[in-house]
Amino acid sequence: MITKEELENQKPFQARSIIEALRKGVVPVDYVPLFTVGRTNWLTFIEDDLENYIAEGGSKVRFISGDYGDGKTHFMSVIHHMALAKGFAISFVVLTREVPIHKFETVYQNIVRQLRGNFEGTGIRSLLESWLQQLASTDIKAALKKEERRKIKAGELETESRTKGDKIEEIISEMGRQFREIQGMDINFANALTALLNNHFAPASTSEDVQTHKLASDREVLLNWFEGGKVTKKELKPFQIYEFLNKANSKQFLNSLILFLKHIGHKGMILLFDEMETVIAQSASIRSAAYENVRLLIDNSESSRFLHIFFSIIPDVLISEKGFKSYDALWSRVRSIGDTGTLNFRGVLVDIHRTPLTTEELIELGRIIRTIHGNSYRWNADDAVKDELIDQICINQKRMGVLSEVRLFIKQVIRVLDMAEQGESTEQMDIKQQIVETRREMESEKMEHLQPSWDD
């Protein structure tokens, strides 16, 4: 995480890349904590749940509700950083035309491909490769050294003792047994992990070229299976794997993944699904399939442990006739989440629209953007755009009833900084008119964002 001191000393290219991302309404992932101001109550209670409930074996689903521009994606990114820092594995899935929520297998594939945790890289492949490398350098290596010390102490001759390959085979067999005995672990998942161990630690043979090709081929089959990809029964049979990923067994597969993550040191798993609101614009059949999968994920959370699922939605998802209430099986599960008129920070609904940033918090955010803009274009932004002008932006947004729209504020601050850097007098700027123009642009972005596309 970058500090404020590092921010002030950023190179112009780094600073400019942040500004260009902000123009599009996106905070670069690595800089999310730096732009996090306000909403401390929500984050405090979510943090408490992660540490004292999810990490202890609990499970929960939350819906993050806010209008377009309120900062839902940023809020989820904050949770992403928080969970990683606390030792959870996380997967942040953006629901798009390529990742439609009504196709569960596709969603699951993206869950495992976006997986991050205490390992290098992203995805279940990186997780498994990191695990295998860790075993090679620690667990198995330590077991072999222990065996070597035993032989020396016993005075055994090399020819009379077990070979290194025999010992590794024994270690893998024991690990496979441990996987199968984990309560709730799917047998196919346990056998796939064992097969991957055998593949990685297979001893060299005389026909080394042929063996290397076979091992690589088998390894790809196993990794494809873990990713929920296309593999055949014939390819899987040698590994005693008899099921593919499908909606019926997805609960077991997801639960097994969480148990494996726990086994290798993670505190649990956090799933973040962004842009759920785009479902509303789809056809009735697509919406029904999508809402059925939301219900399935809620069921998964209730039958799993160490799992927290977050969905980002707009208020219409809860009140519109095309929202959750259009699907009885889901509505019966969630109908009460938005009933209360008071904010419940421990509840299922995280209503960031009703808890907007204060003027002071927005001004603090504006100062950060000002510093980055100054570094980006090598000019004295602090002298040209004072706090009073940033406050004026807040006052005008409040008068227009759009103070909660953080994205609008960010875009407007950058617009003012751009004009001031190009020589326009801040005293002559029509802040209200600029906000109107910026909001018009955002409305166009919103309409494009909500256009139905999954039916294509």
Image: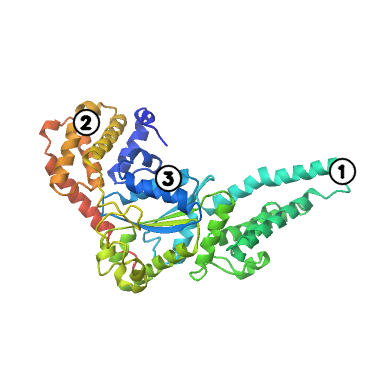
Numbered label attached to residue 82: 3
Residue 372: x %, y % from top left: 31, 33
Circle 1 Cα neighbour tier, 10 Å, few/some/many (<14 / 14–19 / ≥20): few
Residue 239: x %, y % from top left: 66, 64
Q: Amino acid at mark 1?
A: Ala
Residue 13: x %, y % from top left: 36, 33
Left or right position of 118 against 359: right
Residue hosting label 2: 421
Question: What residue is rendered at 37% in x and 57% in y?
Answer: 62
Q: Amino acid at mark 3?
A: Met
As measured in the structure, the alpha-carbon distance from the residue carrying label 3 to the one carrying label 1 is 51 Å
Q: Is residue 375 above or below residue 133?
A: above
From the image, state whether disc 2 or disc 1 is nearer to you.
1
Query: Which residue is nearer to you in this view: 265 or 169?
Result: 265
Numbered label attached to residue 154: 1
Q: Is residue 175 above or below residue 41?
A: below
- The reply to whether residue 114 is visible in this rendering is no
> Which quadrant is home to the N terminus?
top left
Circle 3 Cα neighbour tier, 10 Å, few/some/many (<14 / 14–19 / ≥20): some
